[in-house]
Image (cartoon, rainbow, N blue to C red):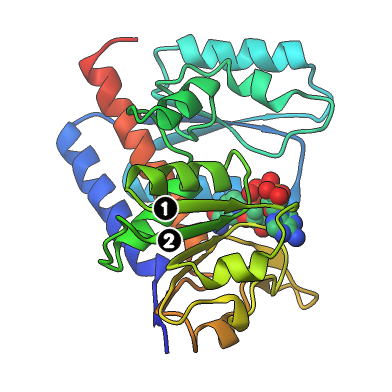
């Protein structure tokens, strides 16, 4: 029976540490969130982020634009926030409407304020092993793996999913910690066989029950990133949790897992951005 890696416990510890450090810092971090449109999931995520900020002693401001905003207007606004001395941290809530180029917009955020870690500069810093902001979900996954105490070096790690937000940054971090990494995606063949060899399995696909117990190596660390809304309105991950927990060594639940860690890592990144800007004026 697997040990449950509790996002609730880990995230609460991280947020507590952030809160303490902000108190000692003596200045409040200022964080700007830009949201476009009224995606219901985004509304919930933004509300939760602002609640976390409140808890940690971070001042958060929401700039809410209608769906019709132009690429130019969005970029100009993000650039203004990046230059402004009023904010230490800036993020664009995703997804944004299809007529907008997400990466072009995000790249208007100064990489030192890019607490979501999604600018091309921060992607490049991560890929080349330099310090920068790491996307929060990917950073949260690593904290959860580390919390098990296993030695990542030399382990066979399999990441299902290759998005810029989760799959790729998780894979790069695992590589940095000397795991042997396989990245699987929608064109991968013999996925089951590959997964069965994984000591560490990260699943970020977005399909309920995508990973079943027979795909899991006994004793493996299983990190379920997926968030799926079931017919009854309840959330579940990509892993068949009830069966998988009988085979895995460690497993994350959904809800109560990676999602909470994503939120906590954002608080940590906001603190880091603030500290960097106190040392070095940008
Ligand atoms: P995405 O749609 O960008 O990527 C999904 C990935 O799954 C793709 O790389 C695709 O190649 C892969 N995939 C699809 N079908 C596959 C198949 N049959 N076999 C193997 N791979 C397959 O999604 P994303 O943004 O990376 O998010 C993935 C999941 O994680 C979603 O459920 C999302 O809601 C969730 N998510 C959770 C958090 C969190 O905080 N917990 C954060 C971000 C995303």
> Badge 2 is on which residue?
156
Q: Residues within 10 Å of mark 1 (few under 14, many from 20)?
A: some
Name the image quarter holding the C terminus: top left
Asked if the residue at label 2 sits under 8 Å from ligand 1, the reply is no
Quadrant for residue 96, please give it.
Answer: top right
Q: Does the residue labelled 1 lie within 8 Å of ligand 1?
A: no
Give the residue at x 32% y 47%: 177
Q: Is residue 52 visible in this depiction of the protein?
A: no
Would you call the spot at circle 2 few (<14 residues within 10 Å), some (14-19), or many (20 or more)?
Answer: many
Q: In this view, does 266 lie to the left or right of 273?
A: right
Position of 240 with respect to 5 (left or right) is: right
Residue found at x 63% / y 79%:
240
In the image, 76 versus 141, the foreground residue is 141
Instruction: Give the CA distance from mark 1 to mark 2.
Output: 5 Å
Instruction: Residue at 72% x, 13% y: name it.
Output: 73
Please report the residue visible at 32 percent of the width from the left and 28 percent of the height from the top: 131
- Vertical side of 72 occupied by 68: above or below: below
How far from the left and from the top, in percent, is residue 121? 48, 20
192 and 267: which one is in front?
192
Q: Are marks 1 and 2 in contact (CB under 8 Å)?
A: yes
Q: In which quarter of the image is residue 108?
A: top right
Image coords of residue 199 (percent x, y): 42, 68
The disc, 1 or 2, on the residue closer to the chain's N-terminal end is 2
Numbered circle sitting on residue 180: 1
Residue 70 disc label: none
Residue 11 at x, y = what percent? 37, 59
In the rendering, at what x and y percent does residue 235 appear?
66, 70
In this rendering, is residue 168 above or below 44? Answer: above
Point out the image quarter for the N terminus.
Answer: bottom left
* Mark 2 element type: strand
Asked whether residue 123 is in view, the answer is yes
Q: What element carries label 1?
A: strand
């Amino acid at each position: 029976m697997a040990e449950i890696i509790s996002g609730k416990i880990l995230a609460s510890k991280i947020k507590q540490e952030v809160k303490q450090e902000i108190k000692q810092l003596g200045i409040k971090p200022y964080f700007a969130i830009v949201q476009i449109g009224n995606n219901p999931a985004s509304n919930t995520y933004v509300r939760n982020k602002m609640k976390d900020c409140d808890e940690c002693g971070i001042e958060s401001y929401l700039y809410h634009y209608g769906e019709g905003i132009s690429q130019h207007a969005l970029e100009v606004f993000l650039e203004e926030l990046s230059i402004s001395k009023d904010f230490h941290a800036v993020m664009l809530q995703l997804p944004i409407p299809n007529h907008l180029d997400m990466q072009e917009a995000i790249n208007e955020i100064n990489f030192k304020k890019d607490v979501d870690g999604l600018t091309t500069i921060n992607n490049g810093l991560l890929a080349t092993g330099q310090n920068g902001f790491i996307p929060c979900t990917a950073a949260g996954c690593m904290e959860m793996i580390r919390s098990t105490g296993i030695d990542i070096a030399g382990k066979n790690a399999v990441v299902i999913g290759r998005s810029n937000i989760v799959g790729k940054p998780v894979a790069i971090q695992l590589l940095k910690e000397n795991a042997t990494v396989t990245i699987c995606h929608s064109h991968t063949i013999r996925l089951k066989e590959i997964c069965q060899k994984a000591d560490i399995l990260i699943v970020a696909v977005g399909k309920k029950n995508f990973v079943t117990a027979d795909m899991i190596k006994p004793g493996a660390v299983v990190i379920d990133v997926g968030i799926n809304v079931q017919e009854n309105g309840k959330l579940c991950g990509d892993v068949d949790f009830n069966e998988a927990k009988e085979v895995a060594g460690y497993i994350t639940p959904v809800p109560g897992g990676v999602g909470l860690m994503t939120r906590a890592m954002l608080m940590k990144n906001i603190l880091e951005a603030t500290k960097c800007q106190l040392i070095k004026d940008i």
